[in-house]
Image: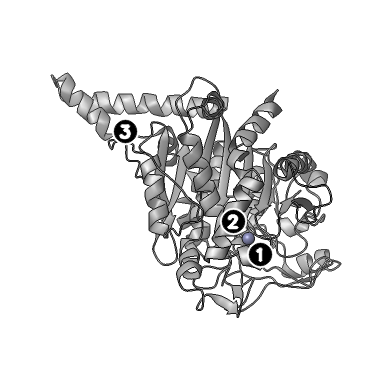
Amino acid sequence: MSTRNYLWRRVFSLLLLIIITVNAPVGASSAVAAESTAEVFETETLKIINHFDYYTDSISPLTDKTMSKSEITEAIAPYGKYLGTPGMPIYAYRDAMEQKWEDVTERNKKFTDVEMDLEKRYTYNSLVNIMKKLSRIDGVNLYKIGKSTENRDMYAIEVDIPSDAEKDTIILTGTIHARETAGCTYILKELVDLLQDNSAKARKTLSRTRFVAVPCVNPDGREGVCYNPETYSYKKGELWKATTSGTDINRNFPGLSWSQLKKGYDKSDYLSTSPDKLYYPGPFAGSAPETRAMMKFLYHYVVIEKAAMYIDYHQQGRIMYTEKPWCSSEQRKLSKDAADHFKEFLNNGQKKSSKNKYTAVKEDKEYGLNGVGSTMTDYACSIANGSKYSRAYGFNVYVTKTNEYPLIMIPRLDDTRKKLVEAPNPTLITFTFEIGWGKDSLGYSAKARSLIADEYTTFHYDKALFEMSEYVHGLRG
Ligand SMILES: [Zn+2]
């Protein structure tokens, strides 16, 4: 925990104490006082979530300095045609940052063993029930963090087992893409097994690492693909990635290149304008309620809590995407080293000659200029570097004392770094796991589940949380 967070928490605890003391009627018995203490119980996280002004903190203080469309068009002409698409409306941004979190931790229920079998079929509700059962363990908190397009509750689970050690925070997210069901089940299985492991190694991991996860970012899409795959296919054999309304959440974040460029930097345009096709980014940035819930979640853990590492679990060809163009060279170096380390870790025991091993792939080198960098990890990186939402642009921008710079105006962050507002999390590591090999492992057929269950142990996901904890702890020296 950083000093700043520690101070925040101290201030909130003190304020609560004062409120409780002031509200207690004269001569109130200690029993009554104890009861009112119980009523206002807030987890450490909720003490911040319920009182901190995320909206004001995350918005640019400048409002009227917009570059003209022609100025931007001219500046980025070498890279592509500027489309000037409308950004995220302020009401939607406010909605994102004012998401209420509800504590649904089952504190007073008895813990019973929880099992997770990757070959079994789980509905979203049964996965939620697994999280609820885990939340009966002391230090495991469960929050509703928002609603999906079809009004399902979205959940974040926080594993923060009481300990005296200073903890590193690791963020895990999964299944933002409907057909990539392994992210959600892997993250849950990893947590289920770690939390019930009594070994010294497991205790050490839990004592020095806080894991926070949204295992299933796209519950509607997942349910659609799992239980109605005929309906949720783009064409035969091509399962859905989007929400059930067609928006690819991982193209919907308000990075400035959300649908901003046509024929971007050495790439053909691949964002679609139709919800029934792959890569439809939504009618406007931040249009999907899932995006908004994740924006607050990420702002909290990346900017306020200063997480050490963020891994987004996807499913496509045993690749790890790293070195985000949205990051500083320091973050890119840290992320590359981490991705290389975890590549070796996952591939351990594989034949040298095997073609089906994990590979780490560098993302485009020009910052944001391919016109599509609106993924969840791109957004996390941009806020880690101090980008703020601009009312004028409707996108996140970098801010100096006098100007707002749309992200597409900054091809290399390092060149401008010195002039910008301070980066709140300059050492954030981000990369993605792309689990599985081939189309057969996508979706939720018996065959897909069997392939994914094999992959889990063959590529050591059963030991991945230990390794993550060890790795980020080692970085602190
Ligand atoms: Zn994906």
What secondary structure is marked by label 1? Answer: loop
Residue that label 3 marks: 41
Q: CA distance from mark 1 to mark 3?
A: 40 Å
Q: Amino acid at mark 2?
A: Ile
Q: CA distance from mark 3 to mark 2?
A: 40 Å
Q: CA distance from mark 2 to mark 1?
A: 32 Å
Q: Position of residue 2 (x, y in %)?
A: 57, 27
Determine the residue positioned at 40% across, 52% down.
128
Q: Amino acid at mark 3?
A: Phe
Q: Position of residue 341 (x, y in %)?
A: 75, 39
Q: Residue 400's quadrant in the figure? A: top right
Q: Is residue 63 rendered to the left or right of residue 158? A: right
Residue 452 numbered mark, or none:
2
What secondary structure is marked by label 3? Answer: loop
Which circle's residue, 2 or 1, is located before the other in the chain? Answer: 1
Which circle's residue, 1 or 3, is located before the other in the chain? Answer: 3
Q: Position of residue 419 (x, y in %)?
A: 76, 42
Whether the residue carrying mark 1 lies under 8 Å from ligand 1 is answered with no
Residue that sits furthest to the right in the current view: 78
Residue that label 1 marks: 258
Are the residues flagged by discs 3 and 2 in contact, CB closer than 8 Å?
no
